[in-house]
Image (cartoon, rainbow, N blue to C red):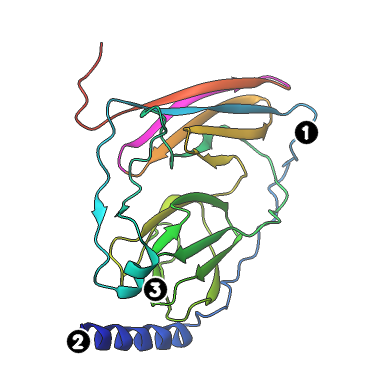
Amino acid sequence: MRLRNVWVSALGLSLAASVVACGGGNKETSFTSAEPPPGATKVDAATAGDVKGMVMLDGMAPKNEGIKMNADPVCVKENTTPQFQETYEVGSDGKSLANVFVYVKDGLGNYVYDPPTDMPRIDQKNCRYHPHVFGMRVGQTLEILNSDPTLHNIHALPKANSEFNNGQPIQGMKMNHTFTAKEVMVPFKCDVHGWMNAYVGVLDHPYFATTDKDGKFELKGLPPGTYTIEAWHEKLGASTQSVTLGAKDAKEIMFTFKAPGAAATD
């Protein structure tokens, strides 16, 4: 245990130094919005509609993998009950699937949107990332917080955006980051605690949601048109549907993912 504590302390100092050296800390990545394309218009709220629905699992959800936190006494202390991964989070019915990212993939055309006014946050609390799956806008500020009295780091592994790896050795430490390109999805991991993982969808429009514990989602304020809606799950992949909305229209859709090992149905 003494050797591990020395290693963690050394890693904390190394990561803290790299945060300063690489301009981490509370510095926000700069981003300047591009000029709206010619002919771009705002969505007319008077004719906008909504798409809502559910994501279901066909078959029995696999058991989530258990997490062993005994390598870090702080993590053990912060969690008094057994901990499991959040890969397959289902409702009381055993079928509705949470943590699915649902968004408009195609069909929006030439619209321009007001910049978001809120600040999404990912919190490292009880040695887990909260939330596990979420969405945000290109150019929007993401607050990264460490609520634990132990070393964490947040290591983003994007493909379209720039990779970053920020250490936070002090409880209450915060830093900000913005993504400059749309990307579904960007995975996060903690190099100190290998069980910690999360995903963010970065989009250039506001039409996205993460399914709740009952598998429900809602995309509000869509202009009339025909859209490709995609549902993404970290293990089950992606599924799409086409939806056509008229003025002030409302549509309900359902996505169904096949559970691993479930028998095919006719």
- The mark nearer the N terminus, 2 or 1, is 2
Please identify the quadrant where the C terminus is shown: top left
Would you say the residues marked 2 and 1 are in contact, meaning their CB atoms lie under 8 Å apart?
Answer: no
- Helix, strand or loop at disc 1? loop
Looking at the picture, does residue 53 appear above or below residue 1? above
Please identify the quadrant where the N terminus is shown: bottom left
- Residue that numbered label 2 is attached to: 3
Check residue 44 in the rendering and tell me which mark sits there, or answer none: 1
Q: Residue at x 53, y 49 (%)?
A: 135
Separation of residues labelled 2 and 1 (CA atoms): 62 Å
Point out the residue furthest to the top here: 266
Looking at the picture, does residue 85 appear above or below residue 103? below
Can you see residue 248?
yes
- 113 inside magenta stretch: no
- The mark nearer the N terminus, 3 or 1, is 1
User: Which amino acid does the dot numbered 3 rest on?
Assistant: His
Residue 49: x and y in percent read 69, 27
Residue 253: x and y in percent read 51, 22
Task: Judge left or right: residue 19 versus residue 87.
Answer: right
Question: In this orientation, which residue lies closer to the viewer: 228 or 39?
Answer: 228
- The mark nearer the N terminus, 3 or 2, is 2
> Which secondary structure is most common in the magenta stretch?
strand
Q: Residue at x 70, y 55 (%)?
A: 35
Nearer to us: label 3 or label 1 = 3
Separation of residues labelled 3 and 2 (CA atoms): 18 Å
User: Which amino acid does the dot numbered 1 rest on?
Assistant: Asp
Magenta range is 235-247
Question: In this orientation, which residue lies closer to the viewer: 215 or 255?
Answer: 215
Separation of residues labelled 3 and 1 (CA atoms): 44 Å
Question: In this orientation, which residue lies closer to the viewer: 185 or 195?
Answer: 195
- Helix, strand or loop at disc 3? strand
